[in-house]
Image (cartoon, rainbow, N blue to C red):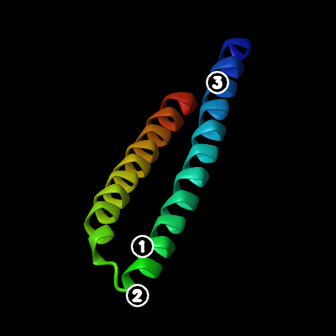
């Protein structure tokens, strides 16, 4: 029975590693978006604020969905 539990745990850890890498990339993009939008806003270009806020919200929702996915994978891997 232990031989069957190991591959499932390894699949869970692989999925968690992949999601962690994707989360890192998404958060870096979100920080870049914030800094670029703030730079444009302070320069007087206010037309980019709303699209950046919408995209930032979508990135947040994506990160939250990935977090929920990791929780489910962790629960199933632990049994």
Q: Position of residue 76 (x, y in %)?
A: 49, 29
Secondary structure under the numbered disc 1 in the rendered image: helix
Per the rendering, the mark at residue 42 is: 2
* Gap between marks 1 and 3 measured at Cα: 39 Å
Secondary structure under the numbered disc 3 in the rendered image: helix
Q: Position of residue 30 (x, y in %)?
A: 48, 62
**Towards the viewer: 77 or 19:** 19
Provide the residue designation for mark 3: 11
Crowd band around label 1 with a 10 angstrom C-alpha radius: few (<14), some (14–19), many (20+): many
Secondary structure under the numbered disc 2 in the rendered image: helix
Per the rendering, the mark at residue 37 is: 1
Q: Give the residue drawn at x 35%, y 63%.
A: 52
Q: Position of residue 62 (x, y in %)?
A: 39, 46
Q: Is residue 5 above or below residue 49?
A: above
Q: Going by the image, does 62 lie left or right of 15?
A: left
Q: Give the residue drawn at x 34%, y 85%.
A: 44
Residue 3 occupies quadrant = top right
Q: Going by the image, does 11 lie left or right of 75?
A: right
């Amino acid at each position: 029975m232990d031989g069957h539990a190991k591959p499932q745990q390894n699949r869970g850890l692989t999925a968690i590693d992949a999601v962690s890498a994707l989360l890192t990339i998404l958060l870096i993009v979100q920080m870049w978006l914030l800094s670029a939008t703030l730079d444009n806003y302070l320069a007087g270009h206010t037309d980019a604020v709303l699209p950046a806020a919408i995209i930032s919200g979508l990135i947040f929702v994506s990160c939250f969905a990935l977090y929920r996915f990791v929780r489910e994978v962790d629960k199933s891997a632990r049994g």
